[in-house]
Amino acid sequence: MANPLMRDVLIEELCSIARRDPDVYFIAADLGAAALDSFREELPRQFIHSGISEQNMIDVAAGLATCGKKVYCYAMSSFITARCYEQIKVALGAMNQPVTLISVGVGMGYDDAGPTHYTTEDIAIMRALPGIEVLSPADAESTLAIARHTHAKPAFRYLRLERPALPPVYQGDFAAALPAGFARVAPGSKVAIVSSGYMLHRSLEARALLAAQGVEPAVFDLFRVKPLDPAALVAALAPYDAVVTVEEQWLAGGFGSVVLEAFSDVGSTKRVVRIGLPDRWFFENGGRKPVLDAFGLGVADIARAVGELHSSPGREGA
């Protein structure tokens, strides 16, 4: 059986929830999914198509939220973040409105659409907003659990969905990990890889490559970068000599910075190596994998960096 798309898992679950809860409203700037068609046809009073007008979509969501509605906004990642950042900041963030922003195709997920659709800075800009929750599921199970979480606990929230279907990471155990915001998804020693979403799968592939060489790093899924308990994350990574973060983002303020800040906040000097995209604009397209491979985020690149640390990781405080 094929792995389901995160988008479809989320929308179908929210539609199911909306059948029972008339206060659930779904606003979409995009109609490119069959699951959206089903939601709109079945629950037309709870579905709003904003058109290609993401700024207005956010303002409408803010108005509905002030009336006690549980609102979800859905669009491509590059358009629901930077295009309407001012509206998100003022109408939702500053007003503390419990609206969930659903972003699909993060990173270079829209590899066939080119650089206008890349989202290589969304973690940095979205986590900068006070009071926001930022979540990045890595498979269908985590997406389903997070969908239910967003309804049970409405909040100002940014949800990052991958565009392609991804193989399962969790086997019925994600709900237990949700309160912490991270989980170890593969055991290991000496070095820990920390990643999320699509790059978590590349990290697991790198681990498999290394395992064939007798090296087995641990792999952690940091699926909630904000809010984050720094002490809890640092304690979970304490058994390892070094940490490697892997992200499909520019390094400035991104995923790896979250981990570095956690170690700094608790006064740890553990060695942390960040692997991410170089500080440049990307005009290349033609496939996510070849672009990532060309810029240091190939599976072999990740394995090489981890293998070097495994051989000589350095000591905390060194």
Image (tube, helix red, strand yellow):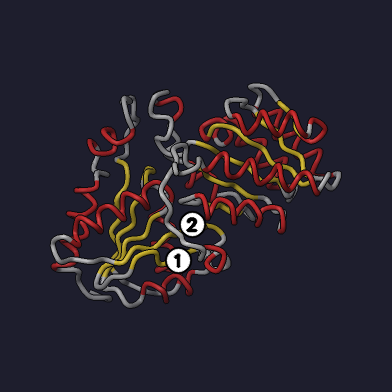
202 sits left or right of 54 in the view = left
Asked where in the image residue 267 lies, by quadrant, the reply is bottom left
Disc sitting over residue 292 in the figure: none
Which mark identifies residue 223?
2
Provide residue 201's location: percent of width, then percent of height: 35, 50
Q: Residue furthest front?
A: 1
- Please tell me which residue is depicted at 62% across the width and 25% down the height of the picture: 31
Q: In the picture provided, is 34 more to the left or to the right than 261?
A: right
Contact between marks 2 and 1 (CB within 8 A): the answer is yes
Question: Which of the two residues, 87 or 171, is positioned nearer the viewer here?
Answer: 171
Q: Which residue lies under the disc numbered 1?
A: 183
Q: Could you tell me residue 20's position as x and y percent?
A: 80, 48
The residue under the point 72% across, 40% down is 91
* Pointer 2 or 1: first along the chain: 1
Residue sitting nearer the eye, 308 or 300: 300
Q: Residue at x 70, y 31 (%)?
A: 57
Q: Is residue 140 left or right of residue 85?
A: left
Q: Residue at x 20, y 55 (%)?
A: 209
Vertically, is 63 above or below 316? above
Mark 1: secondary structure: strand
**Which amino acid, by three-letter code, is at mark 1?**
Ala
The picture places residue 124, in percent across and down from the top left corner, at: 47, 47
Pinpoint residue 172: horizontal percent, then vertical percent: 51, 63
Which quarter of the rendering shows the N terminus? top left
Q: Nearer the viewer, residue 231 or 89?
A: 231
The answer to whether 166 is drawn above or below residue 53 in the figure is below
Q: Secondary structure at mark 2?
A: loop
For residue 45, what is the image quadrant? top right
Local packing at callout 2 (Cα closer than 10 Å; few below 14, some 14-19, many 20+) is: many
For the residues labelled 2 and 1, the Cα–Cα distance comes to 8 Å
